[in-house]
Amino acid sequence: MLYKVKIKVSDLKKSLSWRRSSWGGDEGYLAHAVLYEMFDGPPPLHSYSFTLSRGTIVIEGYTERDCKDMSLKLGKIIECSPLSLKKGEYSFNLTACPVAWIRNEDGKLIEQDVYSHVSRRMDNLPRDLVYAGWLTGKLKPSASVHNLKVRTWHQDMVRRTKARKSYFIRKPVAQFKGILEIKDPHSFERKLLKGIGRHKGFGYGMMRVN
Protein backbone atom coordinates (compact mmCIF):
# COMPACT_ATOMS: atom_id res chain seq x y z
CA MET A 1 0.00 0.00 0.00
CA LEU A 2 1.22 3.46 -0.91
CA TYR A 3 0.53 6.41 1.37
CA LYS A 4 0.73 10.11 0.74
CA VAL A 5 1.95 11.88 3.85
CA LYS A 6 2.30 15.51 4.91
CA ILE A 7 4.52 16.45 7.85
CA LYS A 8 4.87 19.85 9.49
CA VAL A 9 7.83 21.05 11.51
CA SER A 10 7.33 24.37 13.28
CA ASP A 11 9.86 26.59 15.01
CA LEU A 12 12.59 25.11 12.84
CA LYS A 13 15.29 27.37 14.22
CA LYS A 14 15.34 25.26 17.39
CA SER A 15 16.18 22.05 15.52
CA LEU A 16 19.67 20.63 15.29
CA SER A 17 19.37 20.61 11.49
CA TRP A 18 19.03 24.38 11.36
CA ARG A 19 22.03 24.93 13.61
CA ARG A 20 24.35 22.17 12.41
CA SER A 21 23.77 21.71 8.73
CA SER A 22 25.18 25.12 7.70
CA TRP A 23 22.76 24.82 4.82
CA GLY A 24 24.06 27.98 3.19
CA GLY A 25 20.78 29.02 1.61
CA ASP A 26 20.13 25.64 -0.08
CA GLU A 27 16.61 24.86 1.14
CA GLY A 28 16.77 21.34 -0.33
CA TYR A 29 19.81 20.55 1.79
CA LEU A 30 17.99 21.87 4.86
CA ALA A 31 14.93 19.70 4.10
CA HIS A 32 17.24 16.69 3.67
CA ALA A 33 18.84 17.35 7.08
CA VAL A 34 15.46 17.89 8.76
CA LEU A 35 14.16 14.54 7.48
CA TYR A 36 17.20 12.69 8.80
CA GLU A 37 16.75 14.33 12.17
CA MET A 38 13.02 13.66 12.12
CA PHE A 39 13.42 9.91 11.61
CA ASP A 40 16.74 9.61 13.43
CA GLY A 41 18.28 8.18 10.27
CA PRO A 42 17.35 7.57 6.60
CA PRO A 43 13.72 8.68 6.05
CA PRO A 44 11.06 6.40 4.52
CA LEU A 45 10.31 9.09 1.91
CA HIS A 46 12.27 8.36 -1.28
CA SER A 47 10.98 11.51 -2.97
CA TYR A 48 9.22 14.51 -1.54
CA SER A 49 8.45 18.19 -2.00
CA PHE A 50 8.49 20.92 0.60
CA THR A 51 7.61 24.51 1.37
CA LEU A 52 9.60 26.64 3.78
CA SER A 53 8.23 29.82 5.33
CA ARG A 54 9.16 31.77 8.47
CA GLY A 55 10.86 28.92 10.28
CA THR A 56 8.21 26.31 9.39
CA ILE A 57 8.70 23.54 6.85
CA VAL A 58 5.93 21.37 5.40
CA ILE A 59 7.09 18.18 3.68
CA GLU A 60 4.91 16.01 1.42
CA GLY A 61 5.88 12.65 0.02
CA TYR A 62 5.02 9.03 -0.65
CA THR A 63 5.82 6.12 1.64
CA GLU A 64 5.00 2.44 2.06
CA ARG A 65 4.95 2.76 5.84
CA ASP A 66 1.60 3.13 7.56
CA CYS A 67 1.73 6.51 9.25
CA LYS A 68 0.41 4.95 12.46
CA ASP A 69 3.74 3.13 12.73
CA MET A 70 5.83 6.26 12.19
CA SER A 71 7.61 7.61 15.22
CA LEU A 72 8.79 11.15 14.60
CA LYS A 73 11.58 12.70 16.60
CA LEU A 74 10.72 16.07 15.12
CA GLY A 75 7.47 17.54 13.75
CA LYS A 76 4.01 16.03 13.44
CA ILE A 77 2.00 14.24 10.77
CA ILE A 78 -0.85 16.47 9.67
CA GLU A 79 -2.14 14.33 6.82
CA CYS A 80 -1.83 10.69 5.77
CA SER A 81 -3.99 8.98 3.16
CA PRO A 82 -3.70 5.75 1.17
CA LEU A 83 -3.18 6.20 -2.55
CA SER A 84 -4.82 3.75 -4.91
CA LEU A 85 -4.52 4.45 -8.62
CA LYS A 86 -6.34 2.72 -11.45
CA LYS A 87 -5.91 2.61 -15.18
CA GLY A 88 -6.98 5.88 -16.75
CA GLU A 89 -6.10 9.52 -17.07
CA TYR A 90 -4.89 11.84 -14.30
CA SER A 91 -3.48 15.35 -14.28
CA PHE A 92 -0.02 15.77 -12.81
CA ASN A 93 2.72 18.25 -12.03
CA LEU A 94 6.37 17.61 -11.30
CA THR A 95 9.54 19.51 -10.49
CA ALA A 96 12.58 17.44 -11.46
CA CYS A 97 16.24 17.55 -12.50
CA PRO A 98 16.50 16.32 -16.10
CA VAL A 99 20.06 15.03 -16.22
CA ALA A 100 21.89 12.22 -18.00
CA TRP A 101 24.91 10.17 -16.95
CA ILE A 102 27.78 10.51 -19.42
CA ARG A 103 31.49 9.74 -19.44
CA ASN A 104 33.85 12.68 -19.64
CA GLU A 105 37.21 12.73 -21.41
CA ASP A 106 38.79 10.89 -18.48
CA GLY A 107 36.20 8.12 -18.65
CA LYS A 108 34.55 9.22 -15.41
CA LEU A 109 30.76 9.13 -15.11
CA ILE A 110 29.34 12.60 -14.53
CA GLU A 111 25.92 14.22 -14.57
CA GLN A 112 24.99 16.58 -17.37
CA ASP A 113 21.89 18.51 -18.34
CA VAL A 114 20.12 16.13 -20.73
CA TYR A 115 19.54 19.06 -23.11
CA SER A 116 23.28 19.77 -23.32
CA HIS A 117 23.94 16.08 -23.89
CA VAL A 118 21.40 15.75 -26.71
CA SER A 119 22.39 19.05 -28.32
CA ARG A 120 25.88 17.71 -29.00
CA ARG A 121 24.38 15.22 -31.41
CA MET A 122 21.36 17.13 -32.74
CA ASP A 123 21.39 20.90 -33.12
CA ASN A 124 18.47 23.32 -32.81
CA LEU A 125 16.19 21.07 -30.78
CA PRO A 126 13.85 23.00 -28.45
CA ARG A 127 14.73 22.52 -24.80
CA ASP A 128 11.14 21.71 -23.82
CA LEU A 129 11.02 18.96 -26.47
CA VAL A 130 14.20 17.35 -25.10
CA TYR A 131 12.93 17.51 -21.53
CA ALA A 132 9.56 16.08 -22.61
CA GLY A 133 11.35 13.12 -24.20
CA TRP A 134 13.37 12.60 -21.03
CA LEU A 135 10.23 12.45 -18.87
CA THR A 136 8.37 10.21 -21.31
CA GLY A 137 11.24 7.74 -21.20
CA LYS A 138 11.22 7.75 -17.40
CA LEU A 139 7.53 6.83 -17.25
CA LYS A 140 7.47 4.06 -19.87
CA PRO A 141 5.98 1.50 -19.98
CA SER A 142 3.75 2.07 -16.93
CA ALA A 143 2.30 5.36 -18.20
CA SER A 144 2.21 7.70 -21.17
CA VAL A 145 1.90 11.48 -21.20
CA HIS A 146 -0.42 13.82 -23.11
CA ASN A 147 -0.64 17.61 -23.33
CA LEU A 148 2.75 17.86 -21.67
CA LYS A 149 4.06 21.34 -20.96
CA VAL A 150 7.41 22.36 -19.57
CA ARG A 151 6.26 25.42 -17.67
CA THR A 152 9.60 26.81 -16.53
CA TRP A 153 13.22 25.77 -16.30
CA HIS A 154 16.19 27.24 -14.49
CA GLN A 155 19.41 26.18 -12.82
CA ASP A 156 19.79 25.69 -9.07
CA MET A 157 22.95 25.79 -7.01
CA VAL A 158 22.67 22.79 -4.70
CA ARG A 159 24.90 21.93 -1.75
CA ARG A 160 26.47 18.50 -1.35
CA THR A 161 28.88 17.03 1.18
CA LYS A 162 31.61 14.47 0.55
CA ALA A 163 34.23 13.34 3.05
CA ARG A 164 32.91 16.03 5.41
CA LYS A 165 33.65 18.73 2.86
CA SER A 166 30.85 20.83 1.36
CA TYR A 167 30.65 22.06 -2.21
CA PHE A 168 28.01 23.45 -4.56
CA ILE A 169 26.97 22.11 -7.95
CA ARG A 170 24.68 23.56 -10.61
CA LYS A 171 21.69 21.47 -11.70
CA PRO A 172 18.95 22.01 -14.30
CA VAL A 173 15.44 22.16 -12.84
CA ALA A 174 12.27 21.85 -14.92
CA GLN A 175 8.59 22.04 -14.03
CA PHE A 176 6.29 19.69 -15.93
CA LYS A 177 2.51 19.70 -16.19
CA GLY A 178 0.21 17.48 -18.23
CA ILE A 179 -2.07 14.46 -18.41
CA LEU A 180 -0.99 10.94 -17.51
CA GLU A 181 -2.51 7.81 -18.92
CA ILE A 182 -1.70 5.06 -16.43
CA LYS A 183 -1.44 1.65 -18.07
CA ASP A 184 0.05 -0.39 -15.23
CA PRO A 185 -1.05 1.02 -11.83
CA HIS A 186 1.23 -1.17 -9.72
CA SER A 187 4.33 -0.36 -11.76
CA PHE A 188 3.45 3.33 -11.84
CA GLU A 189 2.99 3.46 -8.06
CA ARG A 190 6.54 2.11 -7.72
CA LYS A 191 7.75 5.00 -9.83
CA LEU A 192 5.84 7.45 -7.64
CA LEU A 193 7.42 5.94 -4.56
CA LYS A 194 10.97 6.12 -5.94
CA GLY A 195 10.52 9.53 -7.59
CA ILE A 196 11.55 10.79 -11.01
CA GLY A 197 15.12 11.71 -11.89
CA ARG A 198 18.05 12.68 -9.69
CA HIS A 199 18.38 14.53 -6.36
CA LYS A 200 15.14 13.12 -4.97
CA GLY A 201 16.53 13.30 -1.46
CA PHE A 202 16.70 17.08 -1.76
CA GLY A 203 13.14 17.92 -2.79
CA TYR A 204 13.11 17.07 -6.51
CA GLY A 205 11.26 14.31 -8.36
CA MET A 206 7.95 13.99 -6.47
CA MET A 207 5.12 13.73 -8.97
CA ARG A 208 1.76 15.04 -7.77
CA VAL A 209 -1.12 13.11 -9.32
CA ASN A 210 -4.74 14.31 -9.26
Image (cartoon, rainbow, N blue to C red):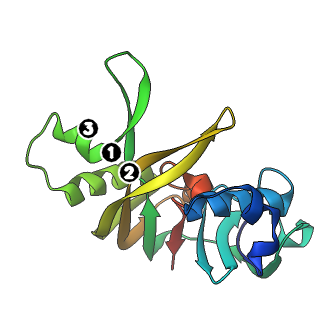
Q: In this rendering, does residue 169 appear at all?
A: yes
Q: Are marks 1 and 3 in contact (CB under 8 Å)?
A: yes
How many residues crowd around disc 2 within 10 Å: few (fewer than 14), some, or many (20 or more)?
many
Label 1: which residue? 113
Q: Is residue 73 above or below residue 131?
A: below
Q: Is residue 1 visible?
A: no
Mark 3: secondary structure: helix
- As drawn, the residue found furthest toward the top would be 106
Cα gap from disc 1 to disc 2, whole angstroms:
6 Å
Q: In what quadrant of the picture does the N terminus appear?
A: bottom right
Image mark count: 3
Name the residue tied to disc 2.
98
State left or right for residue 168 relative to residue 57. Answer: left
Q: Position of residue 88 (x, y in %)?
A: 46, 72
The numbered mark at residue 117 is 3
How far separated are the C-alphas under marks 3 and 2?
11 Å
Under mark 2, the amino acid is: Pro
Q: Is residue 201 above or below residue 66?
A: above
**Mark 1 is on which residue type?**
Asp
Question: Dot 3 surroundings within 10 Å: few (below 14), some, or many (20 or more)?
Answer: some
Residue 151 quadrant: bottom left
